Amino acid sequence: MKKIFTLLVLVALMQRAFGQTETFDITTYTPPKDFKKESKQGVVIYTHVNTTTGSFCVIAIYASSASAGDEQKDFGNEWKDLVITPYKAEANPKTETQTNAEGWKAVAGATAVKQDGLDSYVILTVFSGFGKTTSVLANLNDQAYLPQVDSLLESMKLDKTSSPVAVTNEKNNPIINQNNVSTEKLGHMLLPPLKGWTLKKYSNAAIFTPNDLLPGQYLEVRIMGSKPFTGTLQQALAESWNDALQDLEATKAYDDKLYDIETEKTSYKGWDYIRGRGTFHANGNETGRYDMHLFVVKLNNRIERIAVWGLMNVNQGDYSPWVNPLYQHAIEEFFYSIKFDDWKEPVLTNGAIKDEGIFGLYQGLELSGGRLDGAYTMFFPNGQIFNGPKFPLQGFYGMNTRVEAELRTKYWGTYTLQNGKGMIKMGYGNIPIKVSGNNLIVTTQNTEHKYEKVPSVDGALFNGTYGFTGDFGSKNPTVKFSPDGKFIDFGGLDILNHQTMDPYNITKEPGSGTYKVKDFTLVFNYTDGRTLQLVFMGEGYDKKNPSPATLTLSFNNDTIYKK
């Protein structure tokens, strides 16, 4: 075993690759042949045991962490945690140091140990540089394994630009930001605040969790480390999915495909991205399933990753907390609000609703499937357009139109207009338009259709109790409005809400509060903090009459009747 140091120092980080390589965290390497691989949080372990001779070799590659700024300090810290503590080994081994052409410094040390009556040698090689440190630990009782250890070290390539994947090393004590009201930075990513969530920021990752989760539920947004981009976006998604599973000690939930690809496109910020969704088992529990959404962004020849996973124990395991509209909305906004310090974004504004000139809402008929159907078109001053058969579920009030267009591309596009003529550009094609007085002429399938301007209903007030026709059994679902902007819900809003996600039905219980009409949206603010938004276009409504016989509400154009 006297040749250990010479062998290690000569071969460490020469960066020559042999055979099929694998990547873990910031390390790409060729694994030892015929060794059994085992992945745990923060470490990949390769083991070989010769049952005939009793010889063995265990090689562990650890996830990187923040460097102490000095290779000797990094080695001392790793030696204490990985050798002294588990093996009761000597505190100050003889070491040798070498710097490679890429600027990484390798410090190697070895010692004889005895554990469970077995004599062996442990060899620790610690690499430091570029703000990071990572380690390889070998434990062997036969010098014949040295060539395999040497070959692995010789094949290693370290990425000096990316951050590590796993948040697994317990000595990486997180910085906890309970209020989470400021922008945080991790690598090149500038993370906007997630209000109402706690942020735990590590040297190699960041984790957000909502503060108001119910007991027994779990949901987190994890910023994973970046990696160099190679291949295709779909390949990057597959690699990142495996990284996430490895980070969680997770296994796939089903024998078929791991996930479905939900989106692959170029964002309005200019970078390419892909989204996948699937389920898995974690923490060695084959009964507990998790729902995961994985966002992978490609820019500047690297990938950035955001994983969202939640325990599927809501409503007897049918859902994870992701289906809570409040959480889902916050996460979607967070993802599309992230910035990068090395990416120049286009200057874009959100779509504010105005009722002047071409701007505003139009209603008309268009030919669809051989029949005329109702259609709505909303022109925003920022050049965006909404064009669909129905309104967004929660109306337009408070909407981030850029994010909404990313999520529901089918109904969003842009437009140009000059001298009364122009073009709507949708994903499925271009639609000629022209202005005729207060009306809009839209040409689809070589046929002109007239769209009429819908007047603003901002500030509308109501007076009276409204309900439904039909048999609701012993229930009488109504909602009472008063002209001072207050309401009392007696179950009517639950009908109008069309809630299908039973675990998070915010209108399940009656209540009261205040209401307002803005941007063709009727907003209910309950005194207990709940908020409901329903579409209100003002069909048949006159502001001079706050007590009409009927009101038409919701994306489904439901009619409620004055009692």
Image (cartoon, grey):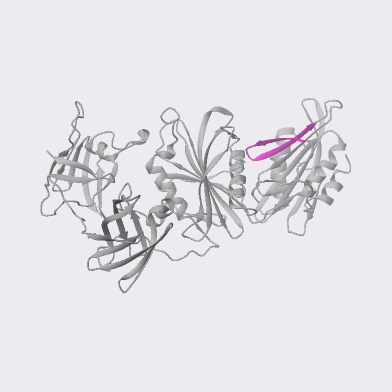
Which residue is painted at 31% across and 47% down in the image? 394
Q: Nearer the viewer, residue 76 or 317?
A: 317
Q: Can residue 42 be found in the magenta stretch? A: yes
Q: Where residue 149 sits in the image (x, y, percent)?
A: 80, 42
Q: Can residue 462 be found in the magenta stretch? A: no
Q: Quadrant of the C terminus?
A: top left
Instruction: Read off the magenta span.
Output: 35-48
Tell me if residue 38 comes above or below residue 459 in the rendering.
Answer: above
Asked whether, in this view, residue 268 is left or right of residue 13, the answer is left
Q: Where residue 305 sits in the image (x, y, percent)?
A: 55, 49
Quadrant housing residue 286: top right
Secondary structure mostly seen in the magenta stretch: strand
Asked whether, in this view, residue 202 is left or right of residue 217, the answer is right
Quadrant housing residue 123: top right
Asked whether, in this view, residue 509 is left or right of residue 309, the answer is left
Residue farthest to the bottom? 419
Q: Nearer the viewer, residue 345 or 142?
A: 345
